[in-house]
Image (spheres, coloured by chain):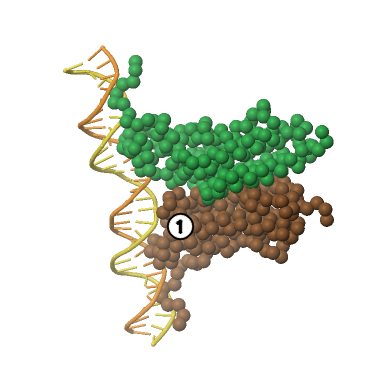
Chain colours: A brown, B green, C orange, D yellow
Amino acid sequence: MAKMGRPRTFDRQKAVVQAMHLFWEHGYEMTSLSQLKANIGGGISTPSFYAAFGSKEELFNEAVQCYLETYACVTDSLWDDEIPPRDAVELALRRSTKMQCESGHPKGCMVSLGTMSAPTPELAHVVEPLTASRSRTLQGFVRCVERAIAMGELAKKANARSMGIAFNSFLQGISILARDGMDAADLDASITELMKLWDIEVCQPK
Amino acid sequence: MAKMGRPRTFDRQKAVVQAMHLFWEHGYEMTSLSQLKANIGGGISTPSFYAAFGSKEELFNEAVQCYLETYACVTDSLWDDEIPPRDAVELALRRSTKMQCESGHPKGCMVSLGTMSAPTPELAHVVEPLTASRSRTLQGFVRCVERAIAMGELAKKANARSMGIAFNSFLQGISILARDGMDAADLDASITELMKLWDIEVCQPK
DNA sequence: ATACATTTGTACCAATCGATCTAAAAGTCG
DNA sequence: CGACTTTTAGATCGATTGGTACAAATGTAT
């Protein structure tokens, strides 16, 4: 049995992407139904919106999932054991910077900037996937340093958690700088500086 | 001639502080008049609010000024030429971390988190003082590195702007980590790691 | 052709947004 | 006391918030 009934006038998948861009730009609560409806398929009506997505919150969840499966993958190298740990860290930083500064979508990272999207405790569950993603990214940095120590690349006395937090805090800050309009080249140069943090912990005698 | 007319039932200065805490926690647009009125002097009426502060935007401006003159001073060391540049940078980072994690007020920095407070361009002017403050802090970091190079403490080949951006991005990221509930001790340890970025650029031969 | 399934547009819902009007209340002055 | 000044409380403003009811429109299946 194929699909029945009157067909949609808009592409549902494209609509999720358009919604993702709006939520990315303005956050959950600051994005209104009017904005969403106006930007989906060149404008849709209220009942069409609710028939297709259920509610604003459900659409947000879909938008977040869409983001996590696409743009957020720039940090996937942190969990790739095929990549040398130093390369994994540098790749995550450089790919994330490039993504956050490129045109065609809002600046910065939706996960990082989502920190301010849930002001009230009763709305915290809405952005929980974003919170979990930030926690996971921090874990990824720590994991890379731990892996390097275990491999003998970094000194045993290196503090994996502190180094991981340093890389992670730098990464989170990029979202704010990108929103403020900083060039990708400037950020890239600062990554080169930051990576020296890794190099000075490398075991000297080979 | 002394003050005339019916006296206020609330302390205007305390009210600005309470409003600052609300704006700090939820941002400009996400803080409603109802919240402000309910939290000022144990609850005030609408006309009392407008008689005392003019409008929501004017109160926000006062709250921002209050923040900049108090909490934001944790980074003042960046412009104090009496302090050795390395100490100035480390002081700014440690004082800011301590402030952002201490109890008695919302976590994180109002200036950094204010990035998400102005979604629409027509509200950008409201948070302009916050944007300017972030720009000023970045300049402060760069200035310290430049001062160290001029003093001969850091190598001439050191990239002042890139290093400044690295310190600044790390600092901005702290707001997000603090909001996520990270301990001040963890952040402090990561500052110790980050400061190695400075030490490796120090001119070796004394 | 007719029954069925789904989306569509129009109108509407209560609640809240920031802000204002009016008038009583509560002080300081002469 | 009475004139003056300011703040107070209650009612209300139009606009917007997220979300529904209802019926016409448009497709597929039999």
Q: Secondary structure at mark 1?
A: loop
Residue at numbered disc 1: A125
Of residue D20 and residue C3, the one placed in the foreground of this image is D20
- Residue A162, position as x, y percentages in the image: 64, 49
Residue type at the position of mark 1: His
Of residue B16 and residue B115, the one placed in the foreground of this image is B16
Whether residue B95 is visible, yes or no, is yes
Instruction: Rate crowding at label 1 as few (under 14), some (14 to 19) or many (20 or more) other CA atoms within 10 Å.
Output: few
Specify the quadrant that holds the N terminus of chain A: bottom left
- Residue B206, position as x, y percentages in the image: 82, 33
> At 65% from the left edge and 62% from the top edge, which residue is drawn?
A79
Question: Does residue D4 lie above or below C21 as drawn?
Answer: above
> At 74% from the left edge and 60% from the top edge, which residue is drawn?
A151
Of residue C24 and residue B66, the one placed in the foreground of this image is B66
Relative side of A17 to B155, left or right: left
When asked about the image quadrant of residue B205, the answer is top right
> At 73% from the left edge and 33% from the top edge, which residue is drawn?
B148
